[in-house]
Amino acid sequence: MATVNRPWWQSGVVYQIYPRSFQDSNGDGIGDLAGIVERIDYLAWLGIDAVWVSPFFPSPMADFGYDVSDYTGVDPIFGKMADFDRLVAALHARNIRLILDFVPNHSSDQHPWFKESRNSRDNPKRDWYIWRDPRPDGGPPNNWLSLATGRNAWQFDPATGQYYFHAFLTEQPDLNWRNPAVRKAMYDALRFWLDRGVDGFRVDVLWHLAKDPEFRDNPINPDYRDSDPPWRRLQQIYNADQPGIIDIVKEMRQLLDSYPGDRPLIGEIYLPRARLMEYYGPHLDAAQLPFNFSLLWESWNREKWNAPALMRLVQDYEAALPRGAWPNWVVGNHDQPRIATRLGAAQARVAMVMLLTLRGTPTLYYADELGHESVQIPPERVRDPFGINMPGGTQGRDPVRTPMPWDASANAGFTKGEPWLPLAWNAAALSVETQKHDAGSMLSLTRSLLALRRSELALAIGDWAPLSSGDGILAYQRTWEGRSFAIVLELESRPKTVRLGDGINGQVALSTHPGRVGQRIAGSVRLDADEAVVVALTD
Ligand code: NOJ
Ligand code: CA
């Protein structure tokens, strides 16, 4: 394997595990930490560098773990602290890093801190959350809307006569990050996990931590369309991303930096590009990887997915990066429809080549390496509160959180019990076991891409340069110390010959299509419909 003196998270690939759905070890139908340990050989075989595990902390599960009631424990559903320690040791033994999900913006309403806080107006923990008097007419303090329900984000508490703020569910009261005692308690929680060997954090809704101190009303959004989620009726101006936010991120970063090894801070930030870049910090001293969701939006459907738009996106993002900042790319997570459903199976393969050959750290969502689609959930089995709460009959996020299909046995090897969400109808055909033995499968493609990245620094950390975006083709080049690759993606589902230019010669190192590897290229390349190739260039 090629090496270079760079932090691991720059050349590495992050794999996101939604722990409820990866592997169940005890037959209760819900994935758990011991289950992940059982599947570590798969992760090593696949060739990823780090896993980010969505929350497994004690929680009433109103938002399936994103409502934490104890920041330094393991929920019994997911196992015990000993299982966590085993997970760290087993991952590290295979040189895989572990990234935890840190949920600092809000706790569960069952967290002891909130229980105290709501006890009385003069409770010492009152100011740990965001409490405000009603308006003179008794209404909520302002017009901010909950991102989870689309309704007003303030909940009246009759016992003390004030409202508390919750950016998400009523069961997820927002912590008051302007209170130094809150920060200290949360940093202690980070230390707890760092001391146990955690290699980094993905920080939930990082841009939400600072709100307008005057709690001004958000303005009406003139661009609101009926198809938008209801909270978009207002512009998100005052409820998040306020002055002071970067200082908070810097504090977190300093804490991570005080530990040995490179332990990155990955920020979940849904903001326009210019604002997103601020989260790197003025001296690259805030988040190392503010999640870049632009490719996720650009792959939203087949209409949006086209070469000129993608080229513009990559160039704009590359150009906007602060000097020395490291890029990153995402096409799926536990909140968004699956890429194979958005683009279809053939273009999902092309998107995988793109995700793993752009410059920057890719995050791969579990089962996307199988080409897994979003699963239709029968109404009586819908579990996601975001689905149940939102008007308009949405299924919420359950369709992208279904169990990982491992083999052709009952419940695809995920559980010996009744799975908490239904499996895909084609789980056996999609399963790891089936695809492993098929050289043309999405799994084999993903694994080959990961292996190639690992052996070629040009692909892992090399420079990026555009080649062409004409004729439904996206082509770009990656280069590191004299070694170059051309990546050519066919996005229109039409076979064609692509002129790359005189002097662009080489050999196909990888293709979405069988039988292409080793083929010589001179000046132009012939692509099948929906084909993507990685060409090792020669002088
Ligand atoms: C973002 C998480 O990704 C999502 O799953 C969660 O519901 C909200 N934050 C609230 O924590
Ligand atoms: Ca279980």
Image (cartoon, helix red, strand yellow):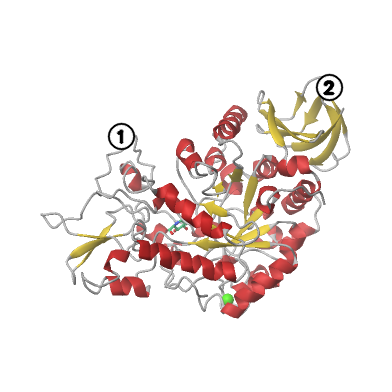
Left or right: residue 513 versus residue 261 is right
| Residue at image location 29% in from the left, 55% down from the top | 153
Label 2 vs label 1: CA separation?
51 Å
Graded by Cα atoms within 10 Å as few (under 14), some (14 to 19) or many (20 or more), the crowding at tag 2 reads few
Outermost residue, top direction?
502
| Amino acid type indicated by mark 1 | Pro
Left or right: residue 261 versus residue 338 is right
Q: Is residue 41 above or below residue 140?
A: below
Q: Pinpoint residue 306: horizontal percent, then vertical percent.
A: 60, 31
Q: Is residue 88 above or below residue 476?
A: below
In this view, the residue in front, 306 or 37, is 37
Q: Pinpoint residue 302: horizontal percent, then vertical percent.
A: 57, 37
Left or right: residue 511 versus residue 128 is right
Q: Name the mark nearer the viewer: 2 or 1.
A: 2
Disc 2 residue lies near ligand 1 with CB under 8 A? no
Looking at the image, is mark 2 or mark 1 earlier in the sequence? 1
Q: How many marks?
A: 2
Q: Is residue 443 above or below residue 276?
A: below
Work out whether residue 27 can be spotted.
Answer: no
- Which residue is the site of mark 2? 503
- Which residue is the site of mark 1? 222
Label 2 sits on a secondary structure element that is loop
In this view, the residue in front, 330 or 337, is 330
Q: Is residue 76 above or below residue 388?
A: below
Q: Point out the image quarter for the C terminus.
A: top right
Label 1 sits on a secondary structure element that is loop
| Amino acid type indicated by mark 2 | Gly
Left or right: residue 2 versus residue 361 is right
Work out whether residue 106 can be spotted.
Answer: yes
